[in-house]
Image: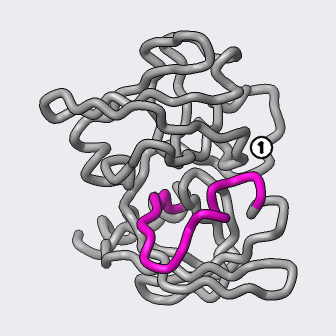
Amino acid sequence: MFTGIIEGFGKVIELKSDRENLHITLESKLTRELKIDQSLAHNGVCLTVVDIKGNQYLVTAVQETLLKSNLGDLKLGDFINLERAMKINGRLDGHIVQGHVDQIGKCIGVENKDGSWIYEFEYASDPGNITIEKGSITINGVSLTVINSRINAFSVAIIPYTYKHTNFNLIKVGDIVNLEFDMIGKYIKKIQSVFSNS
């Protein structure tokens, strides 16, 4: 379980395909605090640390993860948002994030608002995935508040701190991002569909 508050970056050092899996080696300042078997969110995708060497560590993404996220598009030198699992006795500063990406989205607009930025995203229609005005959304692992919610599209406002301390400063129009929709909203939508079909 995560909160969507990014702790640091991971730099992609090596990518190695192994049948349908992708082994990803990253370098990060967080590495010294990691341990093997630990869950760590990578651009919002929960992956298990399987090896650690110095300031580098290794994770593996299976085909299902590669199909539903942007991890299959990684290149050497890319920077990934990282968050360790939340502590039970810690503050929930973002919102409840599972690290299970629902689908990808595409950046269709970036507007500089003289001190902040408005990013607009679109996503493919899925009856279980919705946004609501002032609701929560996770983009590349970052907990954000939805503005301008529309069918299959929405916007978010990015403050300078978030812009500097996440990979939002690298996102441009046309880029693909990972989306995890609000867990409570998904459950409500599922319950509605069950009762409407019965």
Residue at the image position 39 percent from the left and 76 percent from the top = 123
Q: Is residue 64 above or below residue 171?
A: above
Q: Is residue 6 left or right of residue 53?
A: right
Could you tell me the amino acid type at mark 1? Leu
Residue at the image position 52 percent from the left and 55 percent from the top = 183
Residue 196 point in image, percent of width and height? 30, 75
Residue 175 point in image, percent of width and height? 44, 70
Q: Residues within 10 Å of mark 1 (few under 14, many from 20)?
A: some
Residue that carries the numbered disc 1 in the rendered image: 92
Q: Is residue 149 above or below residue 102?
A: below
| Nearer to us in this view, 130 or 187 | 130
The answer to whether residue 168 is magenta is yes
Secondary structure found at label 1: loop
Residue 60 point in image, percent of width and height? 35, 28
How are the residues colored? one colour
Residue 171 point in image, percent of width and height? 56, 68
Q: How many marks?
A: 1
Residue at the image position 74 percent from the left and 85 percent from the top = 112
Q: Which residues are magenta?
A: 164-181
| Nearer to us in this view, 26 or 44 | 26
The answer to whether residue 63 is magenta is no
Residue at the image position 75 percent from the left and 52 percent from the top = 165
| Nearer to us in this view, 82 or 184 | 82
Q: Which quadrant: the C terminus?
A: bottom left
Q: Is residue 187 above or below residue 97?
A: below
Q: Which quadrant: the N terminus?
A: top right
Q: Is residue 39 left or right of residue 113?
A: left
